[in-house]
């Protein structure tokens, strides 16, 4: 996560990468770039609490990894962390609204990695449904990457779709992060006999 002041937007901007989340009650812009990942913008108009997360996988984490892993990269935890932090700022669950983006088919996953993008999309929709949080804007699937700018004071989102295969930096960042997550999962799932 990094911050800078945008003279064009005339606001502070906080850029999130995979596995991060951020909440605020200030007038800021939360920004991220997603491909197969999902980003969820959740807000409460009454308390002006707003936040964003960026996760890679729905919830494939083993119980013994919870305290040692970057749990925010997993959808279940990323959503709970985001909602919990919003509630600490005074948000009421019944007042929460969501905008959800991502899940693009931009990477070639191996068959043993399952349907990552489909799982992400199904998880995000089902989680919000079960929590009773209306999704007022949903832009999921397809083949494009998405650049998201979430204005926390107005809850407006600027969305730009782009071909991640032509944006080598974004594609490379997503491939590196995905590879790292799957390598960590495989290493932890191996059984060593001695």
Image: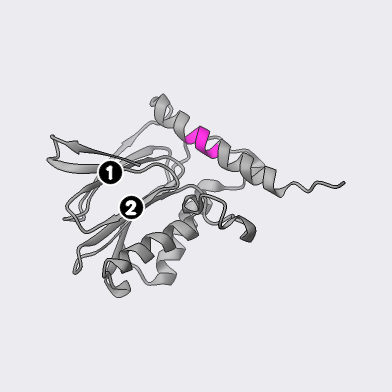
Q: Classify mark 2: residues with Cα within 10 Å, few (<14), some (14-19) or many (20+).
A: some
The residue wearing badge 2 is: 22
Marks 1 and 2, how far apart in space? 8 Å
Q: Residue 114 placed where, x, y %?
A: 61, 47
Which image quarter holds the N terminus? top left
Residue 121, numbered circle: none
Magenta range: 174-178
> In which quarter of the view is residue 48 placed?
bottom left
Q: Is residue 27 above or below residue 18?
A: below
The reply to whether dot 1 and dot 2 touch (C-beta < 8 Å) is yes
Residue at point 43%, 63% (across, down):
80
Mark count: 2
Q: Classify mark 1: residues with Cα within 10 Å, few (<14), some (14-19) or many (20+).
A: some
Q: Residue 17 placed where, x, y %?
A: 39, 41
The residue wearing badge 1 is: 14
Q: Residue 112 placed where, x, y %?
A: 67, 43
Q: Residue 156 placed where, x, y %?
A: 20, 52
Instruction: Name the dominant secondary structure of the magenta segment.
Output: helix
Of marks 1 and 2, which one's residue comes earlier in the chain?
A: 1
Q: Secondary structure at mark 1?
A: strand
Assess whether residue 85 is covered by the magenta stretch. Answer: no
Residue at point 62%, 43% (across, down):
184
Residue at point 38%, 37% (across, down):
145
Question: In the rendered image, is residue 59 in sight?
Answer: yes
Would residue 86 appear left or right of 169 to someone viewing this image? Answer: left
Q: Secondary structure at mark 2?
A: strand
């Amino acid at each position: 996560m990094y911050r800078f002041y945008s003279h064009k937007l005339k606001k502070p901007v906080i850029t999130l990468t995979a596995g991060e989340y951020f909440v605020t009650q200030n007038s800021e812009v939360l920004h991220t770039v997603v491909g197969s990942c999902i980003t969820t913008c959740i807000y409460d108009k009454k308390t002006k609490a707003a936040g964003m997360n960026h996760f890679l996988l729905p919830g494939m984490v083993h119980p013994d990894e919870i305290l040692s892993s970057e749990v925010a990269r997993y959808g279940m935890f990323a959503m709970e962390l985001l909602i919990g932090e919003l509630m600490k700022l005074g948000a009421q669950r019944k007042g929460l609204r969501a905008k959800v983006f991502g899940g693009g088919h931009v990477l070639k996953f191996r068959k043993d990695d399952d349907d990552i993008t489909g799982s992400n999309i199904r998880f995000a929709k089902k989680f919000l449904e079960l929590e009773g949080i209306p999704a007022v804007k949903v832009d999921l699937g397809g083949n494009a990457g998405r650049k998201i700018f979430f204005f926390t004071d107005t809850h407006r989102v600027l969305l730009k779709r782009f071909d991640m295969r032509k944006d080598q930096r974004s594609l490379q960042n997503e491939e590196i992060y995905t590879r790292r997550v799957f390598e960590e999962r495989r290493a932890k799932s191996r059984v060593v006999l001695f």
